Structure formats: C-alpha cells, structure tokens
Image (tube, coloured by chain):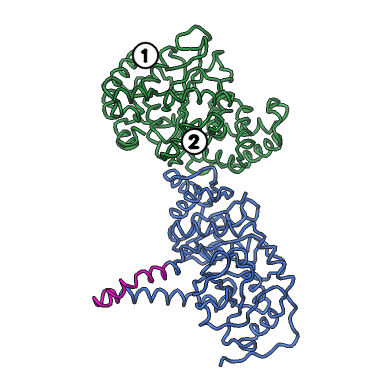
Chain colours: A green, B blue
C-alpha cells in the first residue's frame, strides 16, 4: 500500500518525527480534470510530463519537508490519493520531475475492489481514506502534529476533520460507528477503522486542514468544520497561514509566491487579493502580515536564498509595499480565529456529503 | 491587467446582486485579465462573498462606510457623506487603483462623484451620459442592434461646442465598443435640413459637417431614432432625457397592452401565442439587462451607469462593457477627434421652425 523510503517508514528507527504533512493528489497537488468521461480517460493515460501541478504546490511541499522543526525533529510528507494503484509509476515519476520527496505514498486498491465486487468502494472515500490515515498514524508518537491538504471536489474536509477528532477523542467509538454506517462504508472497512481508532493514543494531532477550492466552492460551505480547516484558493494562502503558525519562514513564503508568478503567470494583484481574502475571512492575523511585510521589505540582506528569478527583488519590494498599504482590516474580519463548536458529523453527512458526493 | 471598480452599494438590489455579479464574473475564464474592486460596506460584502462561488484571486474589497440612496439629492448626499461608496470608488480610480467604474446607484451622485475626482479629456468642457437603445438596423462587426444617444441627462443646458464634443465622444465610443469603425453620427433636430433647429444645433451642424474624420450624416428627427437612421444621435441632456424616458414608456405600454389583450379575449390570446416567437425576439432586443449600461463620456476614466433596477446579469454586462472600454485608447481617440474639430464659424445662422 505505502512506499516509504528506507529508514523512514512507520515504525522504522530513525529521527524523531515532529510533523506529518498529508497530501491528497488529484485537484490538491495535481490539476486533474475528471469531471467528464473524456477528461477521466485522458488523466488515466497521460504521461508524467503532461500532468500539471497546482501553482505553488511543489515549492510549498519542498519547503515544508525541508523546514527545520523547532524541537529538532524532522517532517514527513505522505500522499494519500483516491487514484488507482495502477497509476503509481506515472504519479511517482511526476513527483520526481517536480523535485518533491515523500515518505509515504498510498493509492486506492480499485482493481481489487472491482474484482471482489466491492463496486461501492471504488467511489466511496470515507471507508478508504479514514482507515488509511489511522494506519499511517500508528507508528507515530502522540506529540507528532499533522497538517492535512485536500480539496473541495471530494469529501476531504469531512474525512480530515473526522480523523483529527477521532485522534483527539472528540468522536467516541459509538459515534464513529454511526458515522461510518451513515457514510455507506462496507462493514469490514468499518470494523477495521474502529479497531485502528481503538489502538491509537488520544492526541490533538491534526492542527490544520487546508482545502484547496479547486471548484471554487463557497468558503462558507466549510464553516461547519471550524477554525482548524482553512479553505484556500491557492498555495500562497496556505504558505501565509503556515507562516503565521511558524511552520514556514518568510523566504519560503516568498519562494512559493515567486514560483506562482514566474511559472504560472500570477500577477501581484492576484497575490494581493489572495492575502486580503484571508484577512477578510479572519483566517490570517494582521500582525503576521505586517511581520512578513517588514521581513521582506528588509530585502536582500535577510533573504539571500531567494534565487535568481527574473525581477525577484523588484517583486519582493512591490509585495512588501502592498502589504504595508493594506491598512486597517475590513469590518467582519477575524470571525474564524476563535474556538470552534464541536462538529456535528451526522448532520455534515446529510448536508455536506449528500449520498452521491460521499462516493465522489 | 485591468481593474474595474464597482460601487457595491449602488442600485435597488445592492449589495446582494452587485456582489453576486462580481462573484460570477470572477469565475469567467474569458476575463482573466480583469480584476474587480468592490467598494462598499466590507462587512456585508464579505458575508455575501462567503456564501458564493467566486475566485478570490480576482476580487478585492475596499471599505466605504456610507452609500447614497437612490432618492437622495446628489450634491447634498455627497457633501454630507464624502466617504460614500460612489465617491470612494471614483477617488480610487483617480488614484490609479482602477481604470473604470460601474454603478447602478444614484445617477446624479455618480456624475458628481466622477466630476469631483476625475480630470476631463483635453478639449472636453462638459461630460455626457450616453444611453443605448434598440433599432431595426444592426451595425458594426458585432452586428450590434443598439444605437447610442447622448447626452441623456448629464448636461441639461448645452452649447454648440458641447454638441460637437458629444459627437466626437459618441463616435469614438461606438467605434471602440460596437466595433463600428465609421459610425453614422447625426444631430437630433426638428427637421433634416441643415438650417432647422435651435441656434446651437444649426451651428454645431455647420462644424460637424467639416470634420475630416467624423461620418456626420446631418440632422435626424425623433421618428428616425428607432429606425436606426444614425448609429450615434447627438442632443442636449434635457432633450435626450425626455426622449429616453418616452422610448421606455412606449415599450412598457406595448407590453401592458399585450398583457391586457391576453387576458381579455380568447381569440386575442391565441393570436399572441402565435406571435410569441416574435414577441420574445422583441423582448430580447429591448432587454436593457443585456446591453450593460450607459457610459459617462468626457472624463479621463470610464464610468458605466447600470440601470437602477439592475440584477446580477445587468451588472455583469455593465462590467464587461467597462472592461472593453477601459484601456482601449478611448480617451486618446476622443482627444484626437476634438483636435480635428473645425473652429466655429463667425456668422451665427438663424434657426428655422420645423416644417
């Protein structure tokens, strides 16, 4: 199921793991179109070189994996995707081309599902991803924190939130069983999920969930999942939130921005709007933005590793100026920075994951 | 990259329909080089955006504490609330943060806000508000069914100079927006002869006839407007406003009469059903929501006034018109056209009564 590099797999001896970054692939890391049968077929047969990365995702992943942890531990990158295992070779080649290193790579056993007549499991995600996440957690220490990345096309927001709340002990065994039945999970998958959940020590492990709004869903759709889940329009926004959480440093944020400008044609206006959007939604605090602005305004002396991208220095100066010009926060900002109410998963099943979407 | 400022608080259906329009526009792939700047109550705008599909990379919000209501006296409202959304939006354009402005709000306040913050194109003494109206004929590369009439209310008392300026501005706008390279320009008068009409019309006629670039076709009468005898019809703001309201009134009356007939007799109803295809085409033709709004011409930025009752679709079209007009060299075209305008003739001809 997984393919860990030597010495870094679950349970293997090695450096202490401080943080795990869990990534979905399609529509989260890759710009995948499977909304039509033709697009689905094209996706299935296209080579690694043809696959497109979501702007900023590759740089952000590299930065996260290489970022020094404050406690001296290391970070792991784990992919968990609904793509079939038959695509492993081409997907791994794509990550290699992007220069992205990873520690775990989990794909869905869809051929086995088909051959054993488990047709519902071919589309259903809760019964596949939740036990896979819990299994991936089993080799980690309770204090290892996790940051999860998904998208709005499937049920990632629901699954990652449920995963975090199961680990934290906010969803007990009986409720979890009820949720799994409601989600249409096969009984054997449900039983395996419950067993895995029982075996894990309780911990506030999932500290942040990013949902890439690939379909441009209304951000309000995810309010039910609380402040931990941040809907994002691009990975510059994710980098900003991670900077505020001290998981990334200013040069790393700027490298994500520069990649988006240099390789994907992002304008300064688009980056500025992305920043303002986070502020307006209360997903980012002004002090963090001001600190970032001051750091990048300091410029060359503090950011020696920003590379030789054309116009990089000018871009940074302009960006710093825009940050300072933002002025006071618009009214209504800050609404999502406090404590969140408990998530009603049974209600979320009915409202956010109507039956057809639970399998999407 | 082009930025269009939108007065989020202007119009009968603001801010809901305005924000809905911005959200929908932000998702359109065809306009990826256009950014939208929503100006208004940031709290309300944010709350609306939060529940809508949109692309936040293309939308910025600028807070404005107040708004001018549709019924308010424009000058007084702007004096009392200089931080109203339309005034703030006009200032943002002047500061270079946007290249054009769209509002469905109070027309007078919009014109005043633009006048207070924007500069005029060299040679323009007074601005003109232009309206489009449907005609029998279609024109230009886009097969545009609409003609332009200006001024329809920005400048009530006009001079010969103003009418000539309006002609140049209207022609430049029609060429840019309707892709009609040589629009036919006419003066609205009480007869087609050159000597007909009030003095300023007669004198303007004499000058426009000598313009080296303008496709001036002379005077037309009111009856020629819906026929489409001219692509750009020039008149003073008072006359233009009366004409526009009358055209709207006639259109509404026809619809009401049809509705009455439908209810009154089975035979009439059957006749109307048989004509339904044609009526639908007529409705499409006179559908003000699709043409996007009226441009205010003469300033160094473009302002598009959307109908006060605009819904999301009308606002979207108004923004598209603004995006087409801004950054296309419209101001430069107008300045060049005015430079070529012949000077006034010395002897003022006397006006004639209609005949």
Q: Which residue is mark 1?
A: A200
Q: Is residue B219 magenta?
A: no
Q: Mark 1 falls within which chain?
A: A
In the image, residue A177 lies at what x, y percent? 27, 23
Q: CA distance from mark 1 to mark 2?
A: 30 Å
Up-down relation of residue A262 to residue B42 (above or below)? above
Q: Nearer the viewer, residue B67 or A187?
A: A187
Q: Classify mark 2: helix, strand or loop.
A: strand
Q: Nearer the viewer, residue A65 or B184?
A: B184
In the image, residue A268 lies at what x, y percent? 62, 41
Left or right of A327? Residue B212 is right
Left or right of A66? Residue B329 is right
Q: Quadrant of residue A126?
A: top left
Q: Is residue B281 magenta?
A: yes
Q: Classify mark 1: helix, strand or loop.
A: loop
Asked whether residue A246 appears in the rendered view, the answer is no
Magenta: main secondary structure equals helix
* Residue positioned 32% across, 31% down in the render: A344
Q: Quadrant of residue A201?
A: top left
* Residue positioned 58% across, 67% down in the render: B140
Up-down relation of residue B330 to residue A167 (above or below)? below
* Residue positioned 36% across, 31% down in the render: A341
Q: Nearer the viewer, residue B115 or A354?
A: A354
* Stretch of the chain drawn in magenta: B260-283
């Amino acid at each position: 199921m997984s393919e860990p590099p030597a010495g870094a797999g679950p349970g293997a001896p090695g450096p202490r793991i401080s943080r795990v970054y869990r990534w979905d692939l399609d529509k989260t890391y890759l710009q995948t179109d499977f909304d039509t049968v033709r697009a689905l077929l094209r996706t299935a047969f296209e080579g690694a070189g043809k696959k497109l990365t979501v702007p900023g995702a590759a740089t952000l992943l590299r930065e996260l994996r290489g970022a020094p942890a404050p406690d001296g531990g290391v970070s792991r990158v784990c992919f968990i995707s609904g793509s079939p295992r038959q695509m492993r070779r081409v997907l791994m080649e794509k990550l290699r081309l992007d220069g992205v290193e990873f520690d775990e790579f989990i794909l869905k056993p869809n051929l086995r599902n088909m051959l054993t007549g488990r047709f519902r499991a071919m589309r259903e995600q809760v019964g596949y991803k939740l036990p896979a996440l819990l299994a991936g957690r089993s080799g980690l220490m309770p204090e290892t924190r996790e940051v999860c990345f998904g998208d709005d096309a499937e049920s990632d927001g629901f699954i990652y939130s449920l995963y975090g709340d199961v680990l934290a002990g906010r969803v007990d065994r009986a409720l979890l069983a009820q949720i799994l039945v409601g989600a249409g999970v096969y009984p054997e998958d449900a039983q395996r999920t419950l067993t895995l959940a029982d075996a894990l020590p309780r911990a506030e492990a999932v500290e942040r969930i990013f949902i890439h709004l690939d379909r441009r869903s209304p951000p309000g759709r995810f309010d039910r999942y609380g402040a931990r889940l941040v809907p994002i329009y691009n990975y510059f926004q994710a980098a900003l939130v991670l900077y505020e959480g001290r998981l990334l440093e200013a040069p790393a944020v700027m490298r994500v921005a520069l990649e988006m400008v240099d390789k994907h044609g992002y304008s300064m206006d688009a980056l500025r709007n992305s920043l303002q959007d986070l502020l307006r939604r209360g997903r980012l605090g002004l002090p963090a933005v001001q600190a970032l602005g001051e750091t990048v305004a300091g410029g060359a002396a503090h950011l020696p590793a920003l590379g030789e991208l054309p116009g990089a220095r000018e871009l940074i100066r302009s960006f710093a100026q825009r940050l300072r010009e933002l002025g006071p926060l618009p009214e209504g900002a800050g609404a999502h920075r406090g404590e969140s109410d408990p998530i009603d998963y049974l209600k979320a099943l009915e409202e956010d994951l109507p039956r057809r979407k639970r399998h999407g | 990259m082009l930025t269009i400022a939108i007065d989020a608080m202007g119009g009968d259906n603001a801010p809901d329909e305005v924000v809905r329009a911005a959200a929908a526009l932000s998702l359109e792939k065809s306009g990826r080089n256009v950014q939208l700047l929503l100006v208004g109550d940031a709290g309300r705008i944010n709350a609306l955006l939060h529940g809508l599909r949109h692309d936040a990379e293309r939308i910025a919000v600028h807070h404005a504490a107040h708004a001018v209501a549709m019924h308010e006296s424009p000058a007084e409202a702007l004096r009392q609330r200089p931080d109203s959304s339309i005034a703030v939006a006009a200032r943002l354009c002047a500061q270079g943060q946007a290249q054009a402005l769209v509002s469905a709000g109070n027309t007078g306040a919009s014109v005043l806000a633009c006048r207070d913050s924007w500069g005029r194109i060299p040679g323009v003494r007074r601005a003109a508000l232009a309206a489009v109206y449907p005609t029998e004929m279609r024109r230009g590369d886009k097969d545009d069914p609409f003609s332009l009439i200006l001024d329809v209310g920005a400048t009530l008392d006009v001079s010969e100079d103003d009418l000539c300026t309006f002609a140049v501005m209207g022609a430049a706008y029609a060429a840019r927006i309707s892709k009609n390279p040589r629009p036919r320009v006419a003066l609205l008068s009480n007869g087609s002869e050159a000597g007909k009409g009030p003095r300023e019309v007669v004198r303007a006629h004499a000058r426009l006839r000598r313009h080296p670039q303008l496709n001036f076709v002379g005077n037309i009468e009111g009856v020629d407007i819906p026929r489409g005898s001219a692509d750009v019809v020039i008149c003073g703001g008072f006359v233009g406003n009366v004409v526009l309201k009358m055209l709207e009134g006639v259109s509404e009356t026809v619809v009401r009469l049809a509705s009455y007939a439908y209810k009154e007799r089975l035979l009439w109803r059957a006749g109307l059903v048989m004509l339904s295809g044609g009526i639908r085409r007529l409705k499409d033709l006179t559908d003000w929501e699709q043409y996007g709004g009226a441009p205010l011409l003469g300033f160094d930025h473009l302002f598009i006034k959307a109908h006060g009752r605009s819904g999301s679709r009308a606002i979207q079209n108004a923004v598209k018109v603004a995006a087409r007009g801004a950054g296309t060299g419209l101001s430069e075209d107008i300045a060049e056209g005015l430079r070529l305008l012949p000077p006034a003739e010395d002897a003022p001809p006397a006006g004639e009564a209609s005949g």
